[in-house]
Image: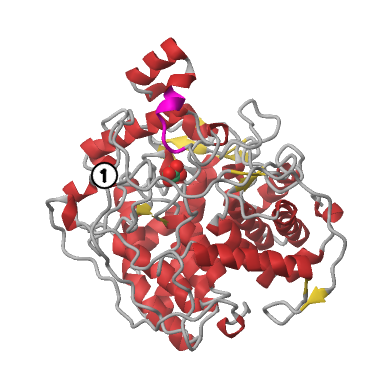
Amino acid sequence: MPAQSSSSPITPASARGASPAAAPPETPTGRAADHPTVGAAGPNRPLADPAGSGAVPAVDVPRPAGPADPVDVMPTTVEAAGSPAGTTVPAAPSAPATPPAPPVPSPAGEIPLPADLAALRETAVGVLRANDLGDITRPSPTLYPHQWLWDSCFIAIGLRHLDPARAAAELLSLLRGQWPGGMIPHVIFAETTDYYHAGPQRWRCDRVCTTAGGVQSTGVTQPPMIAEAAVRVGEAMTRNERVDFYRRLAPGLIRFHEWLYRERDPDDSGLVALVHSWESGMDNTPTWMEMTKPVAPRTVRALRRINGDDALDALRRDSKEVPPDERLTSADLFTLYRIVRELRRSRYDFRTIRDTFVPLVQDVAFNAILIRANEHLVTIADEAGIPIPRWLSRSMRRSRAAMNELWSDGLYFSRDFRTGELLHHPTIASFLPLYAGVVPDDQVDGLVKTLLSPRYWARYGIASVPTDDPAFLPRCYWQGPVWVNMNWLIADGLDRYGRREAADAIRANTVEVIRASGSMFEYYSPLDGSGAGSNRFSWTSALLIDILATHPQVGLTSADSTRNP
Ligand code: DGY
C-alpha cells in the first residue's frame, strides 16, 4: 500500500468541496474571451488537504485568457508577455555511486531510505510544490506552463503518496477541458502570461466548440493514461473516498474512451489513429518524423535551401530555455505547426482530416496504453456502478486482438492508417505492448531479450531509440534519451510477465540516474546519465516518489548492480 497523506511533508491547503465536472450540450461558440483558462492559484499554493482527508476537492473554472500566441507555420514577431523565468541548469555528468549514507525512516515508515535518497525525495516534493497551480500541475516552470494530459496522470501517480485528494483533483481537472464529443485535449491552457509556443491562438478551438469547463485547449489528445492513474490514486483512498472519486470521474472517462473509438477508429479495426505526433506524446520519435517530413511547408524548404537551418532556428521560440539540439529540429517543429493549421481548417474532425495531407498513424504505444486503460476503466465503472456501453466493450476486446497485427520480426511497430503498412522503425514504443499485457506467451521471451540487449538498454534504462540507430542522439528529446515515464511503464509491463528482476533493475536505473544528476530533468542521456531538456520536471519527480514508495528496495541497490540483469 502506498504511503498515506498523514506522513506527507506537504503543507496543508484550504479545504475543497465536491463539484463534478459535467459536459455541456454541444454549442458552437464565439470569441476567445468567452473561454477562460484554468489554474486558479499562484505557483506556490500548497498541495495538501488540511485534515489529510481523502475528500476530493472541487475543480474550479477561473479567469479569462492571457495574451495571444503566434499563429500558423512561421512564427510572427508578436510576443506574449512574460518570457520564461529561470534557466536550465547545465547538464550534469553522471557521478559514481555515492557511499552508503546512514538510513533515515522512509515516509512510508517501511524500508528506511539512505539520507541522500531521502533528500532527493524532498527535492522531488519541492518540484511538485513549485509547479502546483492549485488543482493542476504544470510539467515544468518555463517550457511547459499549462496542463498536459499524460503529464497530469503521471503526476497524480506520485501525488497520491503525498495527498490522495489533491491527486484526484489533478485528474478530475482534466474533465474541464473535455470537448462535447468526448475528447480530452492534450493541453488545457492555464491562467498564465508565460510564453508558450503553441498557445490558444494557434489552435482557435473556441471556433469549434465549448469545453466542459469553458476553458481553452488544444484540438488534439494525448496517451489515455487517466484510468491507470485513477486506479493508482484510488488505491491510496478509503473505499468510500474511492467510490466517490470514481463516480465523479467515470462518466467523463467513459465518454473519452467512446470518443477514441468512435472518432479515431471509424473502420472498427480495433486500433485508434492519431493525427499529430503531439498526440503520441513522443513528439519527434523517428517513426513520426518520417511521416511528417514529407509535408514540410514550402517556406521551410525554401529557407533551408537559402540559409541552412540557422534561419529557421532563429525564428523558433520554444528553444530559449532548452538548447535547440535537445529539442526537435526547427524544420520538424514548423512542419508540426503546419499540421496544426490543417487540423484547424478541418475543424478537428477526423472524417475531414482523413482527406487531407495530415499523416495518420495507428501508434503502437498509444494503443498499448489505451488497452491497459480499458481494463482499468472496467474496474472504475464497476466500482462506481456505472455501466460501460456494450459497443464500447466490443471495441475494447477488438483492440487486444488487433495488437498482434503490429508484430513483425520480433518487435511491435506503429502502422500507417491509410496504407496499412507497418512503420518499421524500432523505438521504445515497440515494448509498450508488455505494459498492455497483450504479448502472446511465445513472443514474450524474444521481446524481453531484445529489450535487455545493450542496443536498447544502455546504462540508465531504456533508450528511446536504439543506440546503434542512425537517428540516435543521446540528449535529443525522443530520439534517444531515457525517459522516466517510459522506464516506469516498461517496468510495470515486465512485472506483468513475471520478469521481476528486470523490472526492478529498470527502477534502480531510474533512481540512480536521477540521484547521479541530483536534479529532476525531463530526460537523461542513456550513455552518461547527464540530464537534458527542461529541469524541475514534474513527472520525473512524481515517478521518483512513486518508485521509492512502492519499491523502496531498489533505492538501496548499488550503482554497479543497476546494469541490466
Ligand atoms: C511542446 O510544447 O513541445 C509539447 O511537447 C507539445 O505537446
76 sits to left or right of 446: left
Give the residue displayed 62% in from the left and 79% down from the top. 3
Q: Which residues are magenta?
A: 312-318
Comparing 268 with 381, the one in front is 381
Residue 515 location in percent, x, y?
Answer: 73, 57
Tell me the crowding category of disc 1: few under 14, some 14 to 19, or many 20 or more residues within 10 angstroms, Cα based.
some
Q: Residue furthest top?
A: 306
> In the structure shown, which secondary structural element does the residue marked by tag 1 occupy?
loop
Reply yes or no: does residue 29 show up in magenta. Answer: no
Residue picked out by circle 1: 68
Q: Is residue 69 visible?
A: yes
Ligand 1 contact, mark 1 (Cβ < 8 Å): no
- Quadrant showing the N terminus: bottom right
Type of residue at label 1? Answer: Ala
Reply yes or no: does residue 315 show up in magenta. Answer: yes
Give the residue displayed 46% in from the left and 26% down from the top. 313
Residue 150 location in percent, x, y?
Answer: 46, 56
Comparing 550 with 528, the one in front is 528
Q: Quadrant of residue 336?
A: top left
Q: Is residue 410 above or below residue 16?
A: above
Comparing 395 with 22, the one in front is 22
Residue 142 location in percent, x, y?
Answer: 47, 50
Give the residue displayed 45% in from the left and 80% down from the top. 13
Give the residue displayed 18% in from the left and 51% down from the top. 32
271 sits to left or right of 18: right
